[in-house]
Structures are given as C-alpha cells and as structure tokens.
Amino acid sequence: MIIGVPREVHPREIRVALIPEHVAKLSRAGAQILVESGTGRSLNIPDEAYRAAGAKIVSDRKSMLENADLSLSIRPPSPEEVLSLRHNAVYISLMDPFREKNLIGSPYDQLFELDVINDDFKRTDVSVVVGANDVVNPAAKNMPGSPIYGMPILNVDHSKAVIVLKRSMNPGFSGIENQLFVQPNTMMVFGDAKKTLAQIAAAVKSEG
C-alpha cells in the first residue's frame, strides 16, 4: 500500500497527519510512505527524520496524490486535488461538512449519520452498495479477532436484498473476506458502477 502525506498549506495549521514514529510503524508493516517535503516544518521535524523512519521525501504533491492508495492530512484536499486522486483511492482528513459542502458528492440534507440510519436497514427492501467494503462487512459484528471486529458499520446485511457494485471481489484495507458479498440475499454486479446504476435506473423506469 502506498500512503501519501501532503504538507499542510493552511496558514494557521501546525499539526501533521503522521510523525516519524508513526511512519516507522507503518513502514515495518509493509506500507510505502510518501511524505511531501516540508511536512513537519511547523513542528520542527526535518525531512531527514521522516526519511530515517522509512519514508520517501517527495516534492511533487500532485504526483504523490495521483499515486497514493491512501492519503492522510489534517485539512481536507482542495476540489482540484480531489479530482487528481486515482480511482478507488482513499483520502482521510478532518472536514466541516457545513462549510465545505463542495467536497461532498451529495446534498448534505440527503446524508445521514450511521447511528441515525442503521435501524432503517431492517425495513429496507433493497440496498445498493457502491464500492464500499469494510464499512459494510458483518465480520465487524460477528467475527471476534478479525482486524475490523468492533468497528461501527452500516447494517446493510439486514436488508431484504442487497446489490453490490464493485470491480472485483478484492478485499478492503483490512485484507479479509467480506461476509456480505457471499450472503444468499446479495447480488454482486461487477463493472463500472456509474454505468451499471444508469442501466438499473433505466430498467426500473421502463417497468414503472
């Protein structure tokens, strides 16, 4: 896995997403860490400290974001940086959904907190999952000892039927099989999710 750590550019931001100690742990776990030059400057952490911990210091921010599987920062990316992320990449940062609505792909009033929506799944006829993996894996609830056990998830498995749109059966970041994908009430549809959703919508309209 390639993890990118871009330098914080907000003038009042002095925090960093990863310190050298964290870089060393992730490197020992097999991750490749890319750190933008100057990332630790606000905390007087030199590039050399990151390099000694196992990171590769890079100066091309755009290229780093394009190649990273996972990017970590304190402040959210700009809309332009979001567009540069590769398909299936994950960006983890803090975000204010009320002030940064331009970074949310859906109207905010159509988004629900997990604890608000979770009870509705047992009354849902069909749930459509697009790309999600670990966050819908029932193993988080019923497989003690798994890497995600105890993690809050969406109770999609409680729906009467589930349609999962993915490009493959590849596991999520946890690396474990997703129990949802093999449930009797789940239908896996592989391919381009945008095209598939358009085809499903067209079929429903034609039947209606």
Image (cartoon, grey):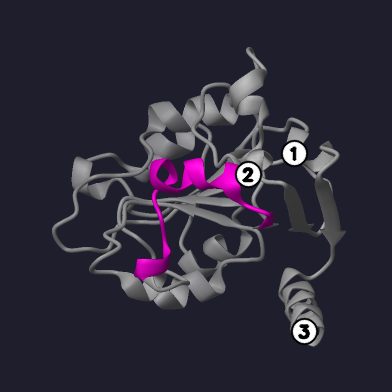
Specify whether 22 is left or right of 169. left
- Along the line of sight, the residue nearer the viewer: 15 or 165: 165
Instruction: Determine which residue is flagged by label 2.
Output: 156
Q: Secondary structure at mark 3?
A: helix
Say which element carries label 1: helix
Q: Earlier in the sequence, mark 3 or mark 1?
A: 1
Q: Which residues are magenta?
A: 108-128
Q: Residue flagged by tag 2: what amino acid is it?
A: Val
Q: Secondary structure at mark 2?
A: helix
The spot of residue 48 in percent (x, y) is 40, 39
Q: Amino acid at mark 1?
A: Leu
Mark in the foreground, 3 or 1:
3
Is residue 150 visible from the viewing direction of this image?
yes
Residue under the point 41% across and 76% down? 79
Measured along the vertical axis of the image, is residue 33 above or below residue 8?
A: above
Q: Residue at x 25, y 66 (%)?
A: 98
Whether residue 147 can be seen here: no
What residue lies at 13% left-to-right and 58% top-to-bottom?
Answer: 12
Along the line of sight, which residue is nearer the eye, 109 or 4? Answer: 109
Q: Residues within 10 Å of mark 3 (few under 14, many from 20)?
A: few
Q: Magenta part mainly helix, strand or loop?
A: helix
Could you tell me if the residues under marks 1 and 2 are in contact, i.e. CB atoms within 8 Å?
yes
**x, y percent for residue 122:** 59, 42
Q: Quadrant of the N terminus?
A: top right
Kindly identify which residue carries mark 3: 202
| Spatial separation of the CA atoms under disc 1 and disc 2 | 8 Å
Type of amino acid under label 3? Ala
| Label placed on residue 180 | 1
Q: Quadrant of the C terminus?
A: bottom right
